[in-house]
């Protein structure tokens, strides 16, 4: 009991001295705090170790989480690119299907598997073949115009010749005037040539070329190209028109195969008799007097071209 009273008196005295805040008490408090500082450090050391361990654990967790988020971001970025590609492909297919409504023929969508690496041969490989009913001479179009025609057919694939190939020719007509001619590939992969046009032909820069339907390979009235240049060689009675294809030759991944209602063989056998007669007569004239039907440059004369055009219109 006596000890309790003594301790209580000491505590009361300390409280009283603290309230008075005398300089002696302040000095003693500072010395006591300085003396007990190592004890404070030692007592807080285990807690500091725990904090350091938690910091390392948090850093490892953040690094792992950061790595996982980066991987997830990469996966999502690839998926986004794939979605964008699928969206673009869907738009192209939708455009193809929309363009097919303007054709009164059976159509089939095919995908381009490969393009020719030969700069002088403009050919593509598609994933439809004989098993799908594809035939030689079949027309290929896209949502913007004529692409070319099938030249070789395999079981599950086919090779098509693009309209820019120098071996390809399409019967066309000027949409504005109805003037009929043939568009030939120039071999540069970008342009078409309309050679041997009379100098007085009614054709202007910007005129749209469409398929004439002659020969039966290409659907009539489908866009082929647009004239962007007219060449008038000096001293020549003919001029040449250069046209840009309307089809996206180097940007299409899907194409449209078009079936003709009448096979090409039947169309050729169904030609009128006077057409065969005129062809035989023309060959006879060419054989009898070939110099009258050609110019000095070896091109058809204007009279011969006029005669051929008249026979064509008949």
Image (spheres, helix red, strand yellow):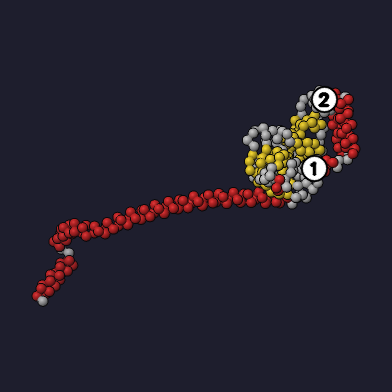
- Percent position of residue 226, x then y: 73, 39
Front of the two marks 2 and 1? 1
Q: Quadrant of the N terminus?
A: bottom left
What residue appears at the point 70 percent right and 42 percent down from the top-left corner?
Answer: 153
Residue 146 picture quarter = top right
User: Residue farthest to the left?
Assistant: 2
Q: Is residue 172 left or right of residue 190?
A: right
Q: Quadrant of the C terminus?
A: top right
Neighbour class for label 2 at 10 Å: few (<14), some, many (≥20)? few
**Element type where label 1 sits in the image:** helix
Q: Badge 1 is on which residue?
A: 264
Q: Earlier in the sequence, mark 2 or mark 1?
A: 1
- Percent position of residue 161, x then y: 70, 38
Q: Is residue 117 left or right of residue 207?
A: left
Q: Are marks 2 and 1 in contact (CB under 8 Å)?
A: no
Q: Badge 2 is on which residue?
A: 295
- Percent position of residue 258, x then y: 74, 46
């Amino acid at each position: 009991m006596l000890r309790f009273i003594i301790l209580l008196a000491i505590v009361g005295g300390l409280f009283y001295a603290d309230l008075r805040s005398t300089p002696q008490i302040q000095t003693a408090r500072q010395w006591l705090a300085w003396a007990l500082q190592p004890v404070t450090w030692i007592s807080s050391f285990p807690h500091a170790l725990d904090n350091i361990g938690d910091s390392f654990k948090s850093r490892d967790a953040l690094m792992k989480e950061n790595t996982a988020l980066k991987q997830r971001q990469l996966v999502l970025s690839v998926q986004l690119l794939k979605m964008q590609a699928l969206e673009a492909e869907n738009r192209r297919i939708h455009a193809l299907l929309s363009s097919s409504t303007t054709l009164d023929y059976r159509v089939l969508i095919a995908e381009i598997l490969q393009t020719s690496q030969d700069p002088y041969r403009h050919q593509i490989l598609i994933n439809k073949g004989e098993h799908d009913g594809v035939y030689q001479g079949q027309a290929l179009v896209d949502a913007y115009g004529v692409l070319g025609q099938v030249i070789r057919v395999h079981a599950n694939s086919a090779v098509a010749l693009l309209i820019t190939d120098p071996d390809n020719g399409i019967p066309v007509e000027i949409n504005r005037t109805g003037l009929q001619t043939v568009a030939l590939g120039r071999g540069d992969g970008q342009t078409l040539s309309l050679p041997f046009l009379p100098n007085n032909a009614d054709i202007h820069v910007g005129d749209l070329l469409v398929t004439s339907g002659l020969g039966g390979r290409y659907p009539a009235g489908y866009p082929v190209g647009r004239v962007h240049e007219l060449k008038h060689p000096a001293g020549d009675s003919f001029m040449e028109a250069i046209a840009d294809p309307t089809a996206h030759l180097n940007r299409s991944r899907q194409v449209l195969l078009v079936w003709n209602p009448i096979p090409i063989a039947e169309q050729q056998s169904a030609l009128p008799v006077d057409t065969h007669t005129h062809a035989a007569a023309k060959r006879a004239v060419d054989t009898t007097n070939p110099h009258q039907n050609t110019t000095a440059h070896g091109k058809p004369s204007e009279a011969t071209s006029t005669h051929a055009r008249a026979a064509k219109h008949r």
